[in-house]
Amino acid sequence: MSEFRFPENFVWGAATAAYQIEGAAHDDGRGPSIWDTFSRTPGKVHRGHTGDVACDHYHRYADDVALMSELGLRAYRFSVAWPRIQPDGTGPVNPRGLDFYDRLTDALLDRGIDPIVTLYHWDLPQSLQDRGGWTNRDTAEHLADYAVAVHHRLGDRIRTWTTLNEPWCSAYLGYGNGVHAPGERDAGAAFAAVHHLLLGHGLAARALRAAGARTLGITLNPADVQPADPDSAADRAAVRLVDGLHNRIFLDPLTGAGYPDDVLEHVSRLVAPTFVRDGDEKTIAAPIDLLGVNYYAPTYVAGRPDGAGGGGAYPGTEGAVEFLPPTGPLTDSGWMIEAAGLTRLLERIDRDYPGLPLMITENGGAFPDRAGADGPVVDSDRIAYLDGHLRAAHRAIARGVDLRGYLVWSLLDNFEWAEGYRKRFGIVHVDYLTQRRTPKSSARWYQEVISRNGL
Ligand code: FCB
């Protein structure tokens, strides 16, 4: 009998994203995405790594699905590459691109693995970026057209549809501090991108619903923002500001409350929010059935009334907020390991946005593991991380949070965006020279967790 048993029908799975694993960058009519361009821009990605080959999953998907089945996964979250479906971002659909996801979906269903689709995991067609990308309102409409095209082909077999992955990253890292594609650095662009991403989500959700999609959602990376000193009013004010720019700016409009006044006030000090038009907030509030939560680490902040704060990826926090350097045990990404943050985050979302079923759509860690001569990678630190976070998730469930599932990030080691291939998040090791897959100890451990439905 497990000590930590999860609810019946709890969904156990793993997640990946198209650009991070597929490779086959030029196959079957795929057009270029902003990540193809960005990874070719000197100095943007570690050692100039690109997703050209990645894990070659495009050609090896059948073996990868067999591996998922061996591990006992019940669900697999993958993303569809928009540039495979509409190489120019708009206009005619490329059937060969859809064929790939058709084959993948059937392979999953054949093995009894539930496919969970993310429509947009950051790989915007480059031609849309040439027209302004997410700073252009038209991109939101194009997302909805693309969503319908994918649903038209796969809607008879796929139940769960997620519009966007982590729009916070797309907007703030892509258009604010330039760490991600397309690499712009402009506060106004970042906020315009936030709004157009949300609008695109709403338009796509509405169109998918009309087309008959059953379970609709969006995945955010909501932050567990904590004060350096809970007794400091300045630190609590910093929490409120960062929480607004990270969490409430997305969750409030998604759940029908519109943008919070304090957030709009902050945005207005940096840019006139003329991109928000009448009716947009209603569109963004299209009903959803599931909120995907990606959690890795907590965020600790301090208020700096003296104006000496370093600020973070949040436009307008420069001077005012200090983001504390992570302490204690860290992952290979330098991220703080604090499982309690996951419990706090899930409880907070449940309290402030009640009635929204949640799923952990990503959680995991990069650890510097190596393949043994021929044996499995022994990644005890990853097992400890996952174990701690599953206990934290269990605690939230025990306290009444409606948590439907857990998807580990990631099935495979893969292209970790600006970090290239140097950060390994997989429960399965990938040898990039041979493309050989080797389940790490964590994969075997996870297999056991799934089979017991608990720890
Ligand atoms: C998330 C991304 C995912 C992966 C993990 C480590 O922000 O959604 O693609 O890179 O971080």
Image (spheres, rainbow, N blue to C red):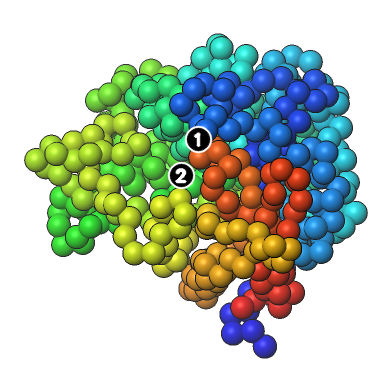
Classed neighbour count for the residue bearing mark 2: other residues with Cα under 10 Å, few (<14), some (14–19), many (≥20) = many
Identify the secondary structure beneath mark 1.
helix
Residue 251's disc number = 2
In the rendered structure, the answer to whether residue 272 lies left or right of residue 28 reads left
Q: Earlier in the sequence, mark 1 or mark 2?
A: 1
Relative to 204, is 399 on the left or the right? left
Give the quarter of the image for residue 422: top right
Relative vertical location of residue 203 with respect to residue 116 in this rendering, above or below: above
146 relative to 319, above or below: above
Element assignment for label 2 = helix
**Residue at image location 41% in from the left, 54% down from the top:** 335
Marking on residue 166:
none
- Please identify the residue farthest to the front as the structure is shown: 373
Quarter of the figure that contains the N terminus: bottom right
Farthest-out residue, left: 306
Distance from Cα at disc 1 to Cα at disc 2 = 33 Å
* Residue 35 spot, x, y in % from top left: 58, 27
Residue 6 x/y as whole percent: 63, 74
Q: Which residue type does callout 1 highlight?
A: His
**10 Å crowding of disc 1: few (<14), some (14-19), many (20+):** some
Which corner quadrant holds the C terminus?
bottom right
Q: Residue at x 15, y 50 (%)?
A: 234
Q: Residue furthest top?
A: 131
Q: Residue at x 18, y 47 (%)?
A: 303
Between 248 and 4, the residue placed more toward the observer is 4
Q: Nearer the viewer, residue 54 or 449?
A: 54
Give the labeled residue for mark 1.
Answer: 46
Q: What amino acid type is highlighted by mark number 2?
A: Leu
